[in-house]
Image: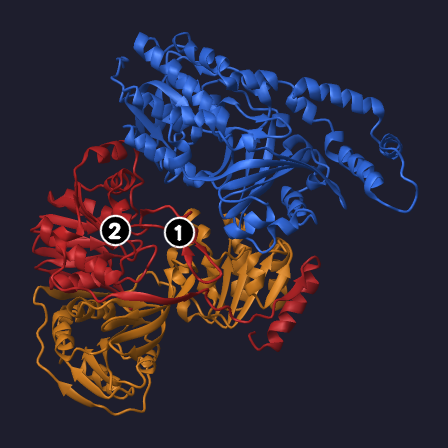
């Protein structure tokens, strides 16, 4: 069996600065393996260990995705090898372009039985890449997956829904997005990182894996800071806690929120 | 259980990917040694929110293309020393084209500089290992043989402690006792974003030129220390450095001192309209030579801030150039020790020799008494108003006949609690220390 | 007239989608039971295409059929709710159309040769208006059920991807908090010094019947709360009647998660806490004194 884990090398909006005109400055935000992707990697590693499968990390993005830092950081999560598409044209790619190129990488890797992803990327956070990737491959997709067992062509998948959990059987290839807390990912140790430095990484350019159908272009017309709701900003001095509490409760009652 | 000689994983383990650690690792990798550079942050620079003035010539020894390739913010061509009082300010404005060519000092933001240094290290063959927090120094028969992080151990002939002012490694190896607080200062810094054009207009600097302010007096609410302000490309780094013992004794929150400085009528206009993009406080060593004790032990050396290599000369706070120099010296000493097959304390002695011979070692000697000098209270409170009174007397045309400047000074002295003998003593101490 | 396809995966709560599609000809493609198709037909869409009873295949197994229908129709805009199964249908449509896909969209306009839309990006730290040179797929919160319409239901023969079947449904064990629907929320931040002190916050929440929530460090750094209680850019986006922030400084990345709140109260000892600029009531004081006093005043 062959398992691919799609991961993203992305900055965290937590560290971005937003200008007065809404432009986002990523200058001080360092890229990392997107925060939920290690959950998918861990889920994949455990299944691979249980079934003797090969675990391949796949990623697409700008040139940085092939940097030594990105390679080691990704491979130390437990992949046997990685295949990445590092191309300036993919810098800041949206979900559809990202997913359709990932689909070509899955075909390039060949004989993949299962693609795992994290719940969402830390920068864009659309939760759409696994769905579009499955669409491009003609496979089904499931999100909020908490457990996977079995082997190729005979996978048992458990996923969370509003009403509870559901168990499904997959007799063919499938794309599964891991729930954010499906498993607790390992914290890579020094030996993991050392080993990661020795594992093979295949670096492709977009020309090697161009999707058959082009994705329509998107142009940014305008940016803005998020609109702030007008707030009262009524200051209550808390140095006398009892008086402050009384004032606040009275105000909230007057506003009909209590 | 028998202890066998385990084959080391690397020739050298460097802990901490700041300036000193990166320079040491880079030099040793260039010399063909296998080096792992362990960094606690997710990437070099990710734990470092600040920046600073870097006296860059020593960096050019390591990276000849430093000024053109590194993420340098601005070349400092103007130094401004400001004595700040509540309602007055006296400044010494020093501009000199000789500071520009060759370039003497530049401003850098560490998040960018450290990332760049990390990349240079990787290109030179250093195995960079970010996101790892070292828990323990491994010793065998009193010799440092490696480090442990979590469940993993790594071994090397030499471990380099480049883990900053709080160096846990240096303490664990018995190289440094807990510092007395008068050797430590608390730095509170912010980076304020402003358009490059606004900075150039406010600070009268063109192109990639920049300004560094050293501020003493009212900026610290009477607490030992000073303020600084310097220009980056499109931001201003601003902060205060406060003597920890005095801060604790006076019981004033450091945030209050910082706030006071930022809102001071002579400082606020420089920052007006800017957005605070980063805010951080951290400890700085400013103990001078007193803090530099043992820098080698069997199997280990200490570099940069971890070795206490910081200088507060009163007018300039230096650390990164000394860190660079110590990295160069450490790499020289370690390379010699590895070549000779002796990484004991005696074998590593070449580090101290090289450091002492370098400008860094010389400067640490030159400024040996600076910290004690800077502890004199008068420096922070009284000289500023004394100077202002003198200037006021000279410039305030209140329609009375002008007095000779010497008389103005004498009158100002009479009102000031600073006594002439203090001035003499401080002057003498200052000349000796600085 | 421009056309919109609304994709529905077994849940008729789509009034926000119908609203967004106003002024276009709307066709809903429904995967799910007949009753879902009927509810969708009543929601104000112009036409409903129903794929028939789904049997023991999960709705996601119909993604290929839905994609084929969308590809044949070539609509200008495809809308879907952000629920997990609906996203799978939307993803298949985006792949087959080669259409960019967007979330957090507040406005969609069909323009000459494309679509213009306004959305919040990167977890809400900024707004962006984009122009797409072709069809666009838009995924937003579906909203609620609405009635008043009466579209005809056309049933088509559909085949599910045969390799995926449901074998078991289990009722929920741990109740996952849905902060998105909470009416009152008391949220704790770094001002709370120790885990044991969360009792203060929880007592206050209990006193006003609120859910407890937190800022990011408490969920991800300290692990005091589970992820479903973390409000912020990479966590939950909430819109309660009352959001009471205790000891949260108010970084943009947190406050974007609570912008939908009707009334915001912030309690912080720092009079300059950024949260106060986004709060209706700014209580400047020590939370360890103010919160117990507030709980007492409400009990």
The residues tagged by marks 2 and 1 sit, at their Cα atoms, a distance apart of 16 Å
| N-terminal label among 2 and 1 | 1
Palette colour of chain B: blue
Circle 2 crowding by C-alpha within 10 Å: few under 14, some 14–19, many from 20: some
> Can you tell which quarter of the image residue C29 is in?
bottom left
The residue tagged 1 is A26
Dividing the image into 4 quarters, which one contains the C terminus of chain C?
Answer: bottom right
Where is B184 relative to A247, above or below?
A: above
Labelled disc at residue B177:
none
Residue B71 percent coordinates (x, y):
41, 39
> Can you tell which quarter of the image residue B156 is in?
top left
Q: Chain of mark 2?
A: A
Farthest right residue in view: B400
Chain identifier, orange in the render: C
Dividing the image into 4 quarters, which one contains the N terminus of chain C?
Answer: bottom left
Of residues B129 and A140, the one drawn nearer to the viewer in this rendering: B129
Mark 2 lies on a secondary structure that is helix
Q: Could you tell me if residue C57 is visible in this image?
A: no
The residue tagged 2 is A88
Residue B384 percent coordinates (x, y):
76, 36
For the point 59% across and 59% down, the residue is: C267
Number of residue marks: 2
Residue C34 percent coordinates (x, y):
18, 83
């Amino acid at each position: 069996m062959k398992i691919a884990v799609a991961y993203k090398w992305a900055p965290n909006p937590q560290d971005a600065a937003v200008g007065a005109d809404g432009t986002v400055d990523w200058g001080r935000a360092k890229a990392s393996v997107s925060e939920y992707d290690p959950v998918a990697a861990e889920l994949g590693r455990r299944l691979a260990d249980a079934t003797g499968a090969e675990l391949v990390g796949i990623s697409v993005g700008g040139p940085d995705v092939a940097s030594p830092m990105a390679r080691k950081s990704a491979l130390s999560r437990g992949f046997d090898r990685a295949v990445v598409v590092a191309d300036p044209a993919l810098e800041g790619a949206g979900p559809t372009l990202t997913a359709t190129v990932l689909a070509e990488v899955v075909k390039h890797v060949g004989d993949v039985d299962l693609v795992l992803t994290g719940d969402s990327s830390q920068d864009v956070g659309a939760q759409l890449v696994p769905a579009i990737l499955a669409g491009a491959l003609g496979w089904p997709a499931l999100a909020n997956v908490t457990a996977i067992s079995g082997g190729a062509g005979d996978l048992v998948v458990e996923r969370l829904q509003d009403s509870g959990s559901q168990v499904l059987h997959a007799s063919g290839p499938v794309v599964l997005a891991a729930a954010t807390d499906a498993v607790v990912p390992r914290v890579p140790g020094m030996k993991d990182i050392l080993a990661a430095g020795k594992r093979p990484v295949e670096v492709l350019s977009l020309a090697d894996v161009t999707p058959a159908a082009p994705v329509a272009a998107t142009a940014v017309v305008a940016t803005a800071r998020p609109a702030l709701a007008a707030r009262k900003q009524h200051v209550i001095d808390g140095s006398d806690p009892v008086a402050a509490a009384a004032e606040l409760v009275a105000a909230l009652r007057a506003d009909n929120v209590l | 259980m028998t202890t066998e000689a385990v084959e080391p994983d690397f020739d050298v383990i460097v802990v901490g990917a700041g300036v000193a650690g990166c320079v040491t690792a880079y030099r040793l990798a260039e010399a063909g040694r296998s080096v792992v550079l362990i960094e606690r942050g997710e990437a070099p620079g990710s734990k470092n929110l600040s920046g600073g003035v870097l006296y860059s010539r020593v960096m050019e020894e390591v990276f000849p293309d430093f000024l053109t390739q590194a993420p340098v913010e601005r070349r400092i061509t103007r130094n401004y020393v400001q004595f700040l009082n509540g309602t007055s300010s006296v400044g010494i404005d020093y501009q000199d084209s000789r500071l520009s060519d060759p370039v003497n000092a530049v401003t850098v933001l560490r998040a960018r500089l450290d990332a760049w240094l990390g990349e240079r290290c990787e290109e030179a063959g250093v195995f960079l290992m970010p996101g790892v927090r070292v828990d323990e120094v491994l010793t065998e028969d009193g010799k440092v043989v490696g480090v442990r992080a979590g469940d993993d151990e790594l071994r090397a002939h030499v471990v380099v402690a480049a883990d900053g002012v709080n160096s846990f490694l240096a303490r664990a190896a018995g190289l440094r006792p807990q510092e007395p607080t008068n050797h430590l200062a608390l730095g509170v810094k912010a980076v304020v974003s402003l358009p490059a054009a606004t900075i150039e207009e406010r600070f009268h600097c063109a192109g990639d030129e920049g300004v560094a302010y050293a501020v003493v007096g009212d900026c610290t609410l009477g607490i030992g220390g000073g303020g600084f302000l310097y220009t980056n490309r499109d931001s201003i780094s601003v902060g205060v450095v406060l003597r920890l013992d005095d801060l604790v004794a006076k019981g004033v929150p450091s945030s209050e001192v910082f706030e006071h400085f930022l809102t001071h009528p002579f400082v606020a206009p420089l920052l007006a309209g800017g957005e605070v993009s980063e805010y951080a406080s951290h400890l700085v060593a400013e103990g001078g030579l007193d803090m530099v004790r043992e820098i080698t032990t069997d199997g280990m050396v200490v570099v940069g801030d971890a070795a206490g290599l910081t200088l507060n000369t009163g007018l300039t706070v230096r650390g990164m150039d000394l860190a660079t120099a110590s990295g160069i010296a450490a790499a020289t000493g370690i390379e010699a020790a590895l070549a000779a097959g002796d990484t004991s304390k005696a074998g590593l002695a070449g580090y101290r020799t090289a450091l002492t011979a370098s400008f860094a070692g010389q400067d640490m000697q030159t400024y040996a008494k600076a910290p004690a000098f800077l502890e004199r209270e008068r420096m922070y409170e009284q000289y500023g108003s004394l100077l202002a009174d003198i200037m006021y007397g000279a410039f305030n045309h209140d329609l009375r006949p002008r007095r000779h400047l010497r008389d103005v000074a004498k009158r100002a002295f009479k009102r000031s609690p600073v006594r002439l003998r203090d001035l003499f003593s401080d002057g003498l101490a200052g000349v000796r220390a600085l | 007239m421009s056309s919109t396809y609304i994709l529905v995966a077994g849940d008729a709560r789509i009034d926000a989608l119908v609203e967004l599609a106003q002024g276009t000809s709307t066709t809903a493609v429904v995967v799910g039971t007949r009753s879902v198709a009927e509810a969708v037909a009543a929601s104000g869409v112009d036409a409903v295409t129903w794929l028939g009873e789904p049997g023991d295949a999960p709705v996601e197994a119909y993604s290929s059929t839905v994609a084929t229908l969308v590809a044949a129709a070539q609509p200008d805009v495809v809308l879907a709710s952000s629920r997990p199964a609906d996203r799978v249908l939307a993803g298949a449509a985006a792949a087959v159309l080669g259409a960019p896909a967007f979330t957090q969209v507040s406005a969609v306009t069909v323009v000459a040769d494309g679509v213009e839309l306004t959305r919040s990006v990167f977890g809400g730290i900024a707004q962006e208006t984009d122009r797409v040179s072709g069809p666009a797929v838009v995924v937003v919160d579906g909203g609620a059920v609405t009635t008043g319409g009466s579209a005809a239901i056309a049933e088509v023969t559909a085949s599910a991807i045969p390799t995926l079947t449901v074998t078991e449904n289990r009722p929920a064990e741990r109740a996952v908090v849905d902060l998105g629907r909470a009416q009152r929320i008391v949220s704790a931040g770094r001002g709370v010094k120790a885990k044991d002190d969360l009792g203060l916050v929880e007592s206050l929440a209990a006193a006003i019947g609120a859910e407890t929530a937190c800022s990011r460090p408490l969920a991800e750094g300290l692990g005091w709360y589970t992820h479903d209680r973390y409000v912020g850019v990479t966590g939950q986006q909430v819109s309660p009647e009352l959001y009471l922030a205790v000891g949260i400084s108010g970084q943009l990345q947190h406050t974007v998660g609570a912008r939908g709140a009707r009334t915001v109260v912030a309690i912080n000892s720092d009079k300059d806490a950024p949260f106060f600029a986004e709060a209706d009531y700014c209580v400047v004081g020590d939370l360890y004194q103010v919160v117990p006093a507030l709980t007492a005043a409400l009990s």
